[in-house]
Amino acid sequence: MSRPLSEDPGSGVRYDGAVDAEQLRRLIRDVPGFPTPEVVFKDITPVLRNGGALRAAVDLIGAPFRKSGVTMVAGIEARGFVLAPPVALALGAGFVPLRKQGKLPYRTRREEYLLEYGSDTLEIHQDAVGPGDRVLLVDDVIATGGTAGAAVRLIEGLGADLAGMGVLIELAFLEGRRALGADIELHAVVTYE
Ligand code: AMP
């Protein structure tokens, strides 16, 4: 049985039935200075460790795309791997991983994207998605949108159709939504302005 939210020390969240987005917001923990001094890390582990909150997070990420004909849910390493598979199950779709360079065993396509300092690379198996697929991209957080942009290029580069992107958290002040472009349907469960 999952632990009621009211037992989560310090969350201040009362559990009486369904968990809503506001309760999820109160469970997400700010960790200032991780992994580098200037970052305030949004820690979702207090959400994941509670069955009711985890269920709500998965339901709320998938809900806007219930009628989008999604055939595949693509999760971004690493925390996207936690959320994307249950969203895929809820939508009756499959799951594909988007991984950091050198982690996927088969033939891959890669996309480089810029970070504040330097760059990073995301890869997908070349047969992961293709024409006829409607792909929902899932991650825990969208910040500047650089990672998501590379993921979109990989998915569309393989000839698949992008249904949209679902995230638990949008850091709106970093304007990732604008970087992604207005033509991409982005839904966030919790937004920080
Ligand atoms: P970005 O490419 O700037 O949109 O960053 C998105 C990726 O970095 C996601 O995969 C997130 O997991 C991670 N990320 C960026 N900022 C944060 C943050 N403040 N807290 C937690 N994860 C973050």
Image (tube, rainbow, N blue to C red):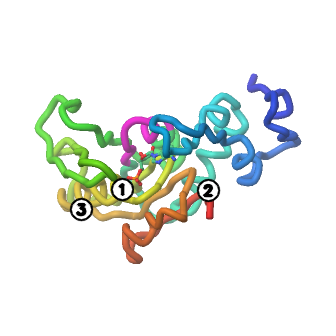
Q: Earlier in the sequence, mark 2 or mark 3?
A: 3
Give the Cα distance between marks 1 and 3: 12 Å
Three-letter code, disc 1: Ala
Kindly identify which residue carries mark 3. 156
Residue 169: image tag: none
Single out the residue that lies furthest toward the left: 107
Q: Which residues are magenta?
A: 74-82
Residues packed near mark 2 inside 10 Å, few (<14), some (14 to 19) or many (20 plus):
many
- The structure residue drawn at horizontal position 14% and vertical position 47%, both measured from the top left corner, is 109
Give the Cα distance between marks 2 and 1: 16 Å
Seen in the picture, residue 146 relative to 48 is either above or below; the reply is: below
Answer with left or right where residue 129 lies relative to residue 20.
Answer: left
Kindly identify which residue carries mark 1. 148
Residue 189: image tag: 2
Task: Report the quarter where the C terminus lies.
Answer: bottom right
Q: Earlier in the sequence, mark 2 or mark 1?
A: 1
Give the Cα distance between marks 2 and 3: 24 Å
